[in-house]
């Protein structure tokens, strides 16, 4: 080890002359292995204390009569003899050395306990894995070699080492020679003076294996002969003394008691708890005494629980043994705290599983968390989760703070929510144990454990955006309580709280400036300001603030430390100190006397009978006549205090509730939800405020009034009551009756506050009602934007409204009011039902008084309903309530259609049933959700003849008893199932709700009838024509659909349009052909998603929110502009003045006052211009296409000019950002209109107005100078962003115009001609979008006519690029070939024929052309794409990289690669291979091969590409792929045959090598096919393709003309001869390629 401390790498000069095989049985290996001579000589020299065992794995126990060797030689001789032990000079691999040293480091860093290391060593020793055996041997060698440095160790590390050293002997981990050497080291240490460090080391070792001393009686004799043996600790000396006789000390009571306790428990639980105790007593610490080991035998049944006697044994053992040697990490407090809590009675798994879990945790690291988590889940069943939680918290988390992050990730990957909750609960339990422990006698250990648990608690809760609930822990009260109790408690609490709060720095919810965090920091800052606070606590607070990035001076404080009257939750006081039973809450409040309904607020005289005047009161015992005085005193106190208390409480409660409810329900569209929540919260807060405000003043006031009354009463003087008796009697009376007075004031305030609360939020309620009645969904855009940008998803408000879990807190508010007993459900429900029955009776009496015979059946229905209400009232049971609800809903549905049209009868009958339904909605009954759910269910189950009544359904919807969207779904399904009644109902329902002629505002939103509209539209389809009844109803269906808003019947409009004459609109989508029709249908969802995204980004795009009359204003202004634009005869200056004047007019009309108004102006203008274009195209068909188009251009050109003028005269001239932003807003608005138009018109969509706008805008921007160098790229970037939003995959109807726009001369020159090629990635994305759209069509053998035109257009664009920007195609050829289908040969040739303009291509037909000697052939081509990123998943890339390394060959890689290539990620089921992945693998392998060749200063030749890992990949694929896969592979290789460069040369050699090495002629035929099919199409042909084919047919080594496939048919043979003549003729290649460019 060469003077290096244990845990570091051994020195490099360690002797290596002995082989590893010489390691003998000391390491647990086979004694027959290794050098026998070395073994024999060492044995003779050492003289072990025990005889040599027959086997290293089965050592026999030594005989008591074993012959002893002479006394120990000096230490120098011991070290010399140690050098002769086999294995001491062995060497190990760096990986083994590193793992061994890492294990020691984790031990000394307290990440592992002594027992953990010993368990690990045992498993390594017995493992069949060679590496683990080597780690075991290496750790033993390092430990024994380190002995010479033990005297320089620190006390703590030396103590750990001593326990580990002794543990090796105790657990039989060393045998024979190593055992003898270990015992000699211990004996040598014990002989040192008691002040020497090694003496303490020897004691720790001896203490650890003292139970085995009885096996070595002669060794005990040597120990007993040490001169200062009498100074040994008594329990160790007893073991040595009795060990000389081969016995254990009989007086070891604690061991026997523990054994009996464990035997009584007879299960693994006892063993496990004992293991916990033993583990903690085996950890590091100081002191001179010994650790306590509690053996615990394990029962084979594995199902028993641990006995609480073990904790008792631990305490008794510690009392007898003195201070623990492990007090640095002592968890005794936690172990003792388990008593009586049930934590010591947990079911634990069998010992084998416990050992595996311990070993798993010992070997846990960040690199293997996922694997270990899966293993952990497989090991444990649900019944042992509680044990696992306790094990993780008590044995790991409390003492391993450095690994908290790792354990947190471990829990996350385990992903068992129940276990996570158990760990959290166990954490809270241990924290409470430490907080309530005896802190006067506690040492540093408990504080350290509490701090560790605080760090863990913060990670589990705040760090995961999970709150610390008030019922579990109140940090602010904890600090205040610790301050009141003194410095000792602060030493515990402050570090704990700072560790908890430290987790807020990684929280998006509780981080600064969270009010909860700032309140806790405020109390800590108050503490920091105290002059007598210890410096370490001040430092902890300062560090916390620094970590959170907060200046202490910025934290508000509220002088809470000096508020001695503040009520706090006691968390540091033990149950004994509180004088309350354990387990009860620390903050005890006086119990309430009344339920809410028992208090009558009709004057306090109604509560007088509740006033108490007990006989035990000394006043009334002596003078009963004084009882009247107490009634008067209480009444006076109530009268005096009620006004100010009620006013103050209502004011505070309303202000608080208003703020919170407005925040929580800012995006809630249902005003009823908001109203109920506000009422529940304000009632609860008001009751609580009154209770805490008036209780103490009431007691004082009652006492004073009673004293005044007694002072004036003559009876008091007659009975001679002294002052003390009067004082005591008054106080007792006040305390007995304060509840009556307080309850009366509370209920009075609660009843008043509800109406006041309603007034405060009436604006919010009315706004939501207006939106609902107008058919719009309520959304507060400001709140929605803030929530999306600033709030984390866990607490973000949803546009869909408040969720059920968010309503929980409001449900709790309504459940029980402070100061009142929990409501008796039966009583409340009964009173509610009685009140409801009384209201129904009133309706019955009102109808009965009219004495109309026709009313009788309905009166009978209402009477039977009232009777059922009274029958249900006493029960408050779900079954009875279901029966009542069924009766009310059925009666309502059955009676409403048949009721005579008498207004009085309708009103009473309707209201009598609705009052029942509303009563069941009351929180005191069954609540809104229950009633809503069951009412909907009953309606679904009702007979068709009664449930499909429009008036009844609308009443139920209006009163929130049925959800409109549920009705929409249900009726739509019924229509699809063929229900004629549902069809008639839906027709009437939509007409009734949305018919504007009725004069009513629609009560439903557009989205409430979406499915009904689709179902009705489906009934108009010709396939239903056979049904006569539906045909007769079709007129009514169309009328109903015509009432719908555009958003609701867009689908219906499109369906009808599809059957119209497609030839009406020249150039429209339907006229394009069937190919785009199919794509249009598939893209509707993408188009709708794009619309939704744009609307979310800019709410002003919503048409519904336009101000009234804005559309008319815009139309007038736009008409004026069109007239102004087309006037002639004006100079440029005059035009500029006119433009300025027009813009000023727009500003004065408030059209340009904000971004929102600008968006609305351009959206409405676009819609008006487009609508005018449609009218021109439809109305002027007879006059010719040119005339109708000219009219469209007249309007659109003026609109474009308006946009240019707006851009030119808006903002600062040099403000580039503002102009680009404004242009983006205009383009996005027009794109939005295009998407909406495409969605609504579908097959009637026409691209002309939008194409004209975009193309003219590009030209106008170019001519106006707005595309100067400063603006050019940013403007083009904006155009590209908008064009990608409306790409053909989203809007197939705009595909032709889109292709023309992206190939516009302004776009091409500005994007591809930009400096530093900044625009190339943008144009590449546009071109890819078009290719991806066309790819599914191009795979077919026959293209529809529409796609043929589009294909020709794309080829022309590629030809332009090939001629003017060939470098662009060169640099991006890989991504383009990825999406071009294999059958598009000419398109691929166009891309691959590109070569840099500064290159002169050599003639491929030159005789004897030496390709490898060309100047450019050694140059690497430039690729602007990260093709390696296509190697998914990452595991494949890693495997490929490793395989290509010189030493990285793997036999499994080829099979793994084939598997990945056959896992296609495309939605097209016809694709069997992952073509992009195949292309990436080919190019990546080739580039790596080229780099490898060039790094050796070699050139690419056919010989260089053969016989290496790179070629083996190609050969394996060509051999094992089927015909399709082989074709795709050869195509991928062919894609790299381009202009002269090293890639072209390499892949050409690869193809030729594969041809010559092919195992069958089928492969050669397929290689020929791939080359030939690229040559028989029209030019251009890639240069690399030509030279490869010429080499193949001309070089005799390939014997091309001798293969059978060349002569299989006369036609084929002639084809080959023709191609060969073309390829071998002498023609300048450069000229040919340039011609191809043209």
Image (spheres, rainbow, N blue to C red):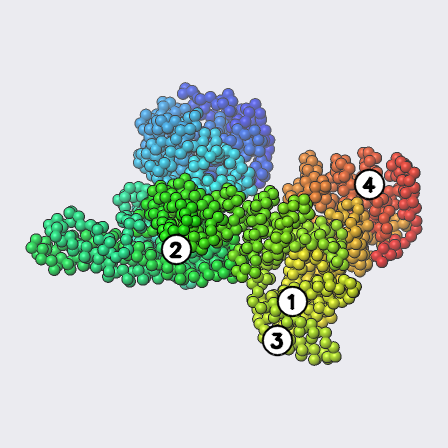
Q: How many neighbours does mark 3 have within 10 angstroms: few (below 14), some (14-19), or many (20 or more)? A: some
> Is residue 194 or residue 851 the one in the foreground?
851
Instruction: Label 3: state its secondary structure.
Output: helix
The image shows residue 600 at horizontal and vertical percentages of 28, 53
Location of the C terminus (image quadrant): bottom right
CA distance for labels 4 and 1: 60 Å
Q: What residue is shown with label 4?
A: 1567
* Residue at (41% x, 51% y) in the render: 852
The image shows residue 1436 at horizontal and vertical percentages of 66, 42
* Residue at (70% x, 39% y) in the render: 1462
Q: What residue is shown with label 2?
A: 679
Q: What residue is shown with label 3?
A: 1145
Residues under numbered marks 2 and 4 in contact, where contact means CB atoms less than 8 Å apart: no
The image shows residue 763 at horizontal and vertical percentages of 45, 62
When the figure is inspected, residue 233 is found, relative to residue 744, above or below; the finding is above
CA distance for labels 3 and 1: 16 Å
1095 sits to left or right of 1609: left
Q: What residue is shown with label 1?
A: 1165
Which is more N-terminal, label 1 or label 3?
Answer: 3
CA distance for labels 4 and 3: 72 Å
């Amino acid at each position: 080890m060469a003077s290096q401390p244990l845990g570091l790498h051994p020195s490099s000069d360690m002797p290596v002359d002995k082989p590893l095989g010489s390691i003998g049985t000391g390491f647990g290996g086979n004694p027959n292995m290794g050098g026998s001579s070395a073994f024999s000589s060492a044995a003779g020299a050492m003289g072990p204390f025990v005889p040599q065992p027959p086997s290293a794995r089965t050592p026999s126990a030594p005989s008591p009569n074993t012959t002893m060797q002479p006394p120990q030689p000096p230490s120098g001789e011991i070290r010399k003899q140690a050098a002769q032990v086999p294995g001491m000079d062995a060497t190990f691999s760096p990986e083994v050395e590193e793992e061994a040293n890492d294990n020691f480091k984790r031990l000394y860093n307290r990440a592992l306990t002594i027992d953990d290391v010993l368990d690990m060593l045992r498993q390594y020793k017995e493992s069949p894995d060679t590496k683990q055996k080597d780690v075991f041997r290496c750790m033993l060698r390092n430990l024994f070699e380190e002995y010479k440095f033990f005297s320089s160790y620190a006390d703590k590390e030396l103590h750990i080492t001593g326990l580990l050293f002794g543990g090796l002997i105790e657990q039989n981990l060393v045998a024979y020679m190593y055992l003898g050497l270990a015992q000699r080291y211990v004996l040598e240490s014990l002989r040192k003076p008691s002040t020497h460090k090694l003496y303490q080391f020897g004691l720790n070792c001896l203490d650890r294996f003292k139970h085995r001393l009885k096996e070595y009686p002669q060794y005990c004799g040597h120990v007993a002969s040490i001169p200062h043996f009498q100074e040994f600790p008594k329990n160790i000396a007893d073991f040595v003394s009795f060990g000389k006789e081969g016995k254990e000390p009989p007086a070891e009571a604690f061991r026997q008691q523990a054994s009996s306790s464990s035997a009584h428990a007879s299960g693994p639980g006892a063993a496990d708890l004992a293991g916990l105790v033993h583990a903690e007593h085996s950890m590091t610490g100081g002191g001179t005494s010994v650790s306590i080991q509690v053996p615990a035998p394990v029962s084979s049944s594995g199902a028993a629980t641990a006995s609480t006697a073990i904790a008792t044994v631990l305490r008794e053992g510690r009392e007898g043994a003195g201070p623990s040697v492990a007090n640095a990490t002592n968890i005794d407090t936690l172990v003792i705290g388990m008593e009586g809590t049930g934590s010591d009675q947990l079911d634990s798994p069998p010992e084998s599983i416990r050992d595996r879990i311990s070993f798993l945790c010992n070997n846990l690291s960040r690199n293997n968390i996922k694997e270990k988590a899966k293993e952990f889940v497989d090991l444990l069943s649900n019944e042992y989760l509680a044990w696992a939680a306790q094990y993780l918290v008590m044995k790991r988390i409390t003492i391993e703070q450095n690994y908290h992050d790792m354990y947190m990730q471990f829990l996350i990957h385990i992903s068992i929510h129940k276990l996570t909750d158990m760990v959290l609960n166990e954490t809270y339990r241990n924290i409470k144990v430490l907080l309530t422990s005896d802190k006067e006698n506690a040492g540093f250990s408990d504080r350290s454990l509490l701090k560790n648990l605080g760090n863990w608690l913060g990670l589990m809760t705040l760090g995961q955006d999970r709150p610390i609930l008030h019922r579990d822990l109140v940090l602010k009260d904890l600090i205040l309580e610790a301050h009141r109790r003194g410095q000792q408690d602060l030493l515990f609490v402050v570090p704990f709280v700072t560790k908890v709060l430290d987790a807020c720095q990684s929280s998006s919810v509780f981080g600064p400036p969270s009010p909860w965090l700032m309140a806790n920091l405020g109390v800590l800052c108050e503490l920091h300001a105290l002059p007598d606070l210890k410096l370490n606590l001040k430092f902890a607070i300062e560090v916390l603030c620094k970590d959170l990035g907060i200046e202490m001076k910025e934290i508000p404080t509220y002088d809470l430390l000096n508020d001695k009257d503040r009520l706090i939750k006691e968390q540091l006081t033990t149950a004994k100190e509180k004088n309350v039973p354990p387990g009860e809450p620390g903050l005890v409040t006086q119990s309430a006397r009344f339920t809410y309904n028992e208090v009558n607020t009709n004057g306090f005289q109604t509560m007088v009978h509740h006033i108490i005047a007990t006989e035990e009161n000394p006043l009334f015992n002596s003078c009963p006549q004084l009882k009247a005085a107490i009634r008067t005193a209480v009444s006076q106190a109530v009268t005096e205090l009620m006004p100010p208390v009620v006013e103050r409480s209502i004011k505070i409660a309303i202000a608080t509730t208003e703020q919170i409810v407005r925040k929580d329900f800012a995006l809630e569209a249902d005003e009823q939800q908001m109203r109920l929540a506000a009422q529940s919260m304000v009632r609860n807060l008001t009751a609580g405020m009154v209770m805490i405000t008036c209780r103490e003043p009431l007691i004082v006031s009652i006492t004073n009034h009673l004293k005044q009354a007694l002072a004036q009463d003559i009876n008091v003087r007659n009975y001679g009551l002294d002052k003390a008796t009067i004082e005591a009697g008054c106080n007792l009376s006040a305390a007995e009756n304060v509840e009556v007075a307080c309850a009366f004031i509370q209920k009075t305030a609660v009843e008043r506050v509800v109406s006041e609360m309603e007034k405060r939020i009436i604006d919010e309620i009315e706004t939501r009602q207006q939106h609902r009645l107008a058919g719009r969904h309520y959304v507060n855009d400001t709140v929605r934007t803030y929530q999306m940008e600033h709030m984390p998803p866990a607490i973000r408000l949803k546009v869909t409204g408040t969720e059920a879990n968010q309503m929980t807190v409001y449900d709790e508010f309504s459940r029980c009011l402070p100061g009142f007993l929990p409501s008796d459900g039966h009583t409340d429900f009964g009173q509610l039902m009685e009140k409801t029955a009384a209201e129904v009776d009133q309706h019955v009496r009102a109808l009965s008084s009219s004495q109309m015979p026709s009313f009788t059946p309905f009166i009978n229905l209402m009477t039977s309903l009232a009777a059922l209400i009274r029958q249900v009232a006493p029960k408050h049971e779900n079954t009875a309530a279901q029966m009542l609800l069924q009766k009310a809903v059925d009666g309502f549905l059955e009676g409403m259609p048949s009721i005579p049209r008498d207004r009085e009868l309708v009103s009473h009958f309707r209201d009598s049933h609705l009052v029942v339904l509303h009563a069941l909605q009351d929180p005191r009954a069954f609540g809104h959700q229950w009633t809503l759910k069951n009412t909907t269910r009953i309606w679904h189950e009702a007979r068709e003849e009664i449930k499909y009544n429009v008036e009844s359904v609308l009443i139920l919807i209006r009163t929130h008893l049925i959800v409109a969207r549920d009705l929409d779904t249900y009726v739509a399904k019924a229509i699809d199932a063929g229900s004629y009644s549902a069809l008639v109902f839906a027709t009437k329902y939509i007409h009734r709700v949305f018919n504007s002629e009725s004069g009513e505002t629609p009560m439903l939103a557009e989205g409430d009838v979406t499915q009904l509209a689709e179902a009705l539209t489906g009934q108009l389809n010709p396939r239903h024509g056979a049904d006569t009844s539906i045909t007769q109803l079709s007129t009514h269906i169309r009328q109903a659909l015509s009432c719908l808003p555009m958003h609701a019947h867009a689908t219906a409009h499109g369906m009808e349009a599809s059957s119209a004459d497609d030839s009406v609109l020249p150039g429209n989508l339907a006229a394009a052909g069937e190919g785009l029709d199919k794509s249009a249908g598939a893209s509707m969802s993408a188009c709708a998603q794009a619309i939704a995204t744009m609307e979310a980004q800019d709410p002003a795009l919503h048409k519904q929110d336009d101000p009234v009359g804005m559309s008319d204003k815009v139309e007038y202004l736009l008409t004026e502009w069109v007239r102004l634009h087309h006037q002639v005869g004006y100079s440029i200056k005059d035009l500029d003045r006119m433009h300025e004047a027009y813009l000023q007019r727009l500003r004065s009309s408030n059209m340009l006052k904000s971004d929102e108004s600008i968006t609305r102006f351009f959206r409405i203008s676009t819609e008006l211009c487009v609508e005018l274009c449609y009218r021109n195209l439809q109305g002027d068909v007879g006059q010719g296409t040119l005339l109708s188009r000219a009219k469209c251009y007249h309007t659109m050109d003026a609109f474009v000019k308006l946009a240019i003028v707006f851009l030119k005269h808006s903002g600062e001239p040099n403000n580039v950002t503002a102009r680009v932003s404004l242009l983006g807003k205009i383009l996005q608005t027009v794109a939005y209109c295009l998407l909406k138009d495409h969605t609504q018109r579908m097959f009637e969509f026409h691209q002309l107005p939008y194409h004209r706008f975009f193309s003219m805008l590009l030209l106008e921007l170019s001519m106006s100078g707005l595309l100067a160098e400063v603006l050019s790229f940013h403007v083009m970037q904006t155009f590209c962003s908008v064009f990608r939003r409306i790409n053909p995959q989203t809007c197939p109807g705009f595909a032709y115009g889109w292709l023309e726009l992206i190939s516009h001369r302004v776009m091409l020159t500005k994007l591809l001609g930009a400096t530093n090629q900044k625009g190339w990635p943008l144009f590449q994305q546009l071109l890819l979008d078009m290719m991806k759209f066309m790819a599914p069509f191009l795979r077919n053998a026959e293209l529809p006519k529409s796609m043929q035109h589009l294909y020709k257009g794309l080829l022309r664009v590629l030809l332009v690029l090939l001629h003017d920007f060939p470098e662009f195609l060169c640099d991006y050829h890989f991504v383009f070939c990825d999406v071009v289908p294999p059958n598009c040969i000419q398109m691929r040739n166009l891309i691959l024929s590109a070569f840099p303009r500064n290159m002169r291509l050599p003639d491929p037909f030159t005789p004897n052309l030496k390709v490898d000697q060309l100047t450019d052939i050694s140059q690497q081509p430039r690729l602007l794409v990260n093709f390696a990123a296509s190697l998914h998943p990452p595991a494949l890339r890693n495997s490929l990289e490793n395989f290509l390394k010189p030493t990285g060959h793997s036999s499994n890689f080829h099979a793994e690669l084939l598997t990945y290539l056959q896992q296609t990620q495309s939605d097209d089921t016809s694709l069997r291979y992952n073509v992009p992945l195949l292309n990436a693998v080919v190019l990546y392998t080739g580039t790596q091969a080229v780099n490898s060749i060039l790094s050796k200063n070699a050139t690419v030749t056919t010989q260089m590409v053969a016989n290496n890992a790179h070629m083996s990949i190609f050969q394996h694929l060509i051999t094992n792929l089927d015909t399709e896969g082989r074709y795709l592979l050869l195509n991928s290789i062919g894609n790299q045959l381009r202009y002269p460069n090293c890639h072209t040369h390499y892949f050409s050699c690869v193809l030729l090598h594969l041809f010559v090495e092919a195992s069958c002629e089928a492969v050669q035929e397929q290689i020929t096919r791939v080359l030939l099919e690229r040559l028989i199409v029209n030019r251009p042909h890639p240069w690399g393709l030509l030279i490869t084919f010429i080499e193949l047919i001309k070089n005799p080594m390939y014997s091309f003309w001798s293969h059978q496939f060349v002569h299989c048919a006369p036609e084929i043979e002639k084809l080959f001869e023709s191609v060969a003549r073309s390829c071998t003729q002498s023609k300048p290649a450069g000229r040919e390629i340039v011609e191809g460019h043209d």
